[in-house]
Amino acid sequence: MFILAIETTGPRCSAALIDEKGIVKELVSEGELKHLQSLTPMISRLMEGASFDEISDIAVSAGPGSFTGIRIGVTTARALAQALSKPLISVPTLHAFGADEEAGEDVLVCPVFNARRNQIYGGAYKEGKEIVAAGAYDLDEFLSMLSGGKYRFIGDGVGAYGEKIDEWARKEEADVSFSTKDQRASGVARMALAMKKDPEAFGGRTGLGYEELEPEYMRKAEAQKKLEDRLKAEKAAGAVKDGSTGRKTGNLTLRTAGADDIPAMVEIENRCFSRPNTEESFRREIEGNPDMDYALAEVDGKPAGYAGLWRVAGEGHINNVAVDPGYRKRGIGTEIIKKLMDDARKEGIKEFTLEVRPSNEAAIALYRKFGFDSEGRRKAYYQDNGEDALIMWRREK
């Protein structure tokens, strides 16, 4: 039997198989930030000559790290676990990364990921045991937990903060070494095997159902604060626009949706779709995923529609476009999509994609107005009636 391990929290994604004796087979993506395109084909290649029946568990590096990468890894692991009826192992990324580093006797291994603004995701490990708890820290705060001794700092935080760490080491007379290596599925696999052998030592992380696995961003509160700051700025600016069809629209306002808007969005969702998303789903995306934004349209202060855009590997995935039936044919959908795409372009996104029912001719016509073309189909994508989905793309130079 094998454990299938997935690692997507760093610049390169990887996948690995480990058997009961600890023998590992691993594949790593050739380029950086190509998780979405690379991960599934990589897993398929990894499984050549093997059967999914031989998989006992699916392990995934749950975070912290790249928000987009975490989301891709967790979503892929959930989908595989559901399809194959396999249990999941939620592997703590920093612990697996630190435990897998061979640094020598009496050396404290300190994985540090660059969280920007003089902040890191970090922890400290000795012979595989956690000495400083994994978390989001100011760099100075983290270093204050260490004193003297031998240390090996690993991860992309070394490139960003190596000089500051070196300066701290001279003051503390600490013996430090560095490595800018990044995370690998082989380390996740070895940690997962240890967790499976001793589940009580990693309480609640093994034997998970697909609905129980959660990403570990470690900075949810900060992400929410950033979103709230954006909302205040947008409300202060006004952002008032007119409708575009000639039918009286009222005062149309566009802004980024926040947590307080979720109940109204759920009401619109229920009026628009036969299989609506839940309040919990909206809350998870709006409060917990900084790579996902929803644009909300209000007419005279009343919510009239919304749509979401998920930033993945430099692409914008538009989803869940909904306009309340009482406000349709007023150009509101056009304005919502325009706002999402304009905001994404400011972040350097030039490729956009979405799925739509072939029977939804009005939506297809709207998307074509924005330059989207059909490039493929997802068979039986919609669960309510088994209808295919058209995959549409707009690619800008």
Image: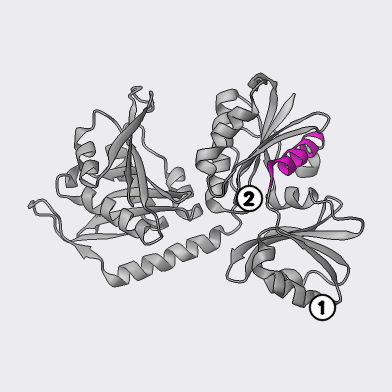
Discs 1/2, front = 1
Judge left or right: residue 88 versus residue 252: right
Residue 330 image point, x, y percent: 14, 49
- In the rendered structure, which amino acid carries the disc numbered 2? Gly
- In which quadrant of the rendered view does residue 317 lie? top left
Determine which residue is flagged by label 2.
63
Residue 135 image point, x, y percent: 68, 59
Judge left or right: residue 291 versus residue 120: left
Contact check, label 1 and label 2, Cβ < 8 Å: no
Sequence-wise, the earlier of marks 1 and 2 is 2
Residue 320 image point, x, y percent: 34, 42
Residue 78 visible to the viewer = no
Answer above or below: position of 117 versus 101: below
- In the rendered structure, which amino acid carries the disc numbered 1? Arg
Q: Is residue 120 magenta?
A: no
Answer above or below: position of 31 versus 251: above
Residue 269 image point, x, y percent: 32, 41
Q: Residue at x 19, y 37 (%)?
A: 362
Residue 54 visible to the viewer = yes
Frontmost residue, 106 versus 286: 106
Q: Which residues are magenta?
A: 184-197
Determine which residue is flagged by label 1.
170
Q: Quadrant of the N terminus?
A: top right
Q: Residue at x 32, y 54 (%)?
A: 341
SS under mark 1: helix
